[in-house]
Amino acid sequence: VNNAGMAGKNTQVWNYPNDEWLKVMNLDLNSVFYCCKAIVPHMIKNNYGRIVNIASIAGKEGNPNASAYSTAKAGVIGLTKSLGKELADKNIAVNAVTPAAAKTRIFDQMTEEHINYMLSKIPRNRFAKVDELASLVTWLAAEENSFSTAAVFDLSGGRATY
């Protein structure tokens, strides 16, 4: 399960510091690439594997003032779809989960205004619970999930538009 992430600054694209952009890309996207690259050969050798990448609804929709995070998580979705198709005939499933937001330590990196914006977009009028996310990830990582791959599973409280 690839679940590392940081929110980065809440600011407009034209004001985004270059070094901060690279920090977010390295942690939120490049780390997923490097972890997959390291583990996939072992999974191929064993003819079995499950990879679950935690993306974000921001990667599907883009959040204003969160361009680096939104861009990195969109990249995680693209990587998941590509890798899932590359490994589909090898009994290796690669899927992503796109939570709207779960109240975790990442909220400490966000402005109150941005947190309120995210909540206002969720029809369920609450953030995801970590246990809800864990249940979905557990199933995706299980042997029982023998068919789904290269897929994106929304956990958005109704926010997802596609």
Image: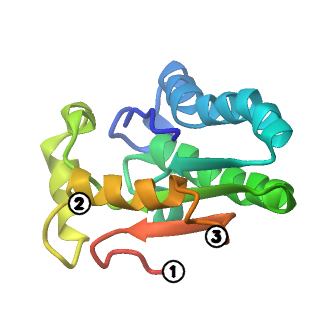
Q: Amino acid at mark 3?
A: Ser
Given this view, does label 3 or label 2 mark the residue nearer the observer?
3
Q: Tell me which label, 1 or 2, sits earlier in the chain.
A: 2
Identity of the residue drawn at 56% across and 43% down: 72
Can you tell which quarter of the image residue 157 is in?
bottom left
Q: Position of residue 83 (x, y in %)?
A: 77, 52
Identity of the residue drawn at 16% across and 49% down: 113
The residue where tag 3 is placed is 148
Q: Nearer the viewer, residue 3 or 67?
A: 3
Alpha-carbon span between mark 3 and mark 2: 23 Å
Count of picture labels: 3
Q: Which mark is residue 162?
A: 1
Q: Which mark is residue 128?
A: 2
Q: Nearer the viewer, residue 142 or 2?
A: 142
Q: Position of residue 149 (x, y in %)?
A: 68, 65
Determine whether the residue tagged by mark 3 lies in a helix, strand or loop.
Answer: loop
Q: Is residue 10 above or below residue 75?
A: above
Given this view, does label 1 or label 3 mark the residue nearer the observer?
3
Q: Amino acid at mark 1?
A: Tyr
Q: Position of residue 3 (x, y in %)?
A: 45, 38
